Image (spheres, grey):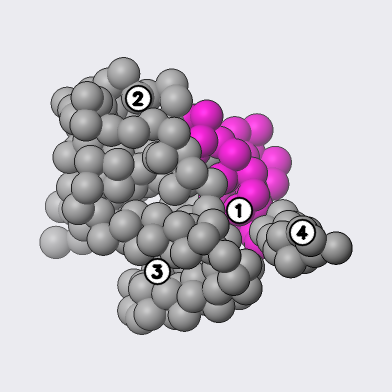
């Protein structure tokens, strides 16, 4: 069958539905899986596109393609909690190896494009990648802000960690993104979901 390789790829990536993330869904009842996260960021990107700083330089369809494939590597390496400092060490290398193997299995131009988009996202240098990264980091932040923040509380996440891992990537996408981050961060600290920096001094 001519498209058997493509069908095999689709069956293989179905495993993304089984990759559990630390973040909880908005109803606070269970942790989300990575396939759900991927769907949500694709919707989120379309809604927030008008607020992007470099909107005229952003190819929204390309961003959507980027967001749809960038977490597929988690099938092989799992989700790394962004506030797990030990887990973040070597994350890029582990995921790059997984990306090369997974996208290489397509053995066609689409597989090559997927790998290029994945690397571009990780590099965070183009307007498309800057916007995509902001969306990817903002949605878990928004979800935690509108729930009890279980994943933050469990890990005793600090203001310093949040600023280190999220602030620049979110804020560089535009003023609206920066305002949302700043407002929600202050609220989350006040609510005790995130430990204030001065508490630790």
x and y percentages locating residue 159 in the rendered image: 25, 51
Rendered view: 177 above or below 133: above
Task: Tell me, yes or no, whether the two marked residues, 2 and 3, touch with CB atoms within 8 Å.
Answer: no
**First in sequence: mark 4 vs mark 1:** 4
Query: How far apart are the alpha carbons under marks 3 and 1?
Result: 17 Å
Disc 1 designates what residue?
Answer: 34
Disc number placed over residue 84 in the picture, else none:
3
Rendered view: 92 above or below 18: below
Q: Residue at x 26, y 61 (%)?
A: 123
Query: How far apart are the alpha carbons under marks 2 and 4?
Result: 34 Å
> From the viewer's perspective, is the residue at label 2 or at label 4 nearer?
4
In the figure, is residue 140 to the left or right of 181? right
Disc 2 designates what residue?
Answer: 49
**Disc 4 packing (10 Å; few <14; some 14–19; many ≥20):** few
Q: Which residue is drawn at 47% across and 38% down?
A: 64
Query: How far apart are the alpha carbons under marks 4 and 1?
Result: 26 Å
Disc number placed over residue 3 in the picture, else none:
4
Local secondary structure at mark 2 = helix
Q: What stretch is highlighted in magenta?
A: 19-44
Local secondary structure at mark 3 = loop
Quadrant containing the C terminus in the rendered view: bottom left
**First in sequence: mark 2 vs mark 4:** 4
**Disc 3 packing (10 Å; few <14; some 14–19; many ≥20):** few
Res 76 visible: yes
Task: Tell me, yes or no, whether the two marked residues, 2 and 1, touch with CB atoms within 8 Å.
Answer: no
Query: How far apart are the alpha carbons under marks 2 and 1?
Result: 22 Å
Rendered view: 26 above or below 114: above
Foreground residue, 74 or 3?
3
């Amino acid at each position: 069958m001519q498209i058997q390789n493509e069908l095999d790829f689709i069956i293989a990536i179905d495993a993304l539905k089984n990759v559990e993330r630390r973040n909880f869904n908005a109803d606070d009842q269970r942790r989300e899986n990575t396939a759900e996260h991927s769907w949500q960021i694709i919707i989120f990107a379309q809604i927030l596109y008008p607020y992007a700083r470099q909107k005229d330089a952003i190819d929204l369809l390309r961003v959507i393609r980027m967001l749809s494939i960038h977490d597929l590597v988690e099938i092989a390496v799992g989700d790394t909690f962004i506030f797990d400092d030990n887990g973040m060490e070597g994350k890029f290398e582990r995921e790059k190896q997984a990306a090369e193997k997974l996208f290489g299995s397509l053995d066609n131009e689409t597989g090559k494009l997927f790998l290029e988009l994945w690397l571009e996202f990780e590099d965070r240098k183009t307007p498309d990648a800057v916007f995509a990264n902001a969306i990817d980091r903002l949605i878990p932040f928004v979800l935690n802000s509108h729930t009890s923040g279980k994943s933050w509380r469990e890990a005793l996440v600090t203001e310093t960690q949040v600023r280190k891992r999220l602030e620049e990537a979110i804020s560089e996408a535009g003023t609206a993104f920066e305002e949302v981050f700043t407002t929600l961060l202050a609220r989350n600290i006040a609510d005790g979901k995130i430990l204030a920096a001065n508490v630790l001094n």
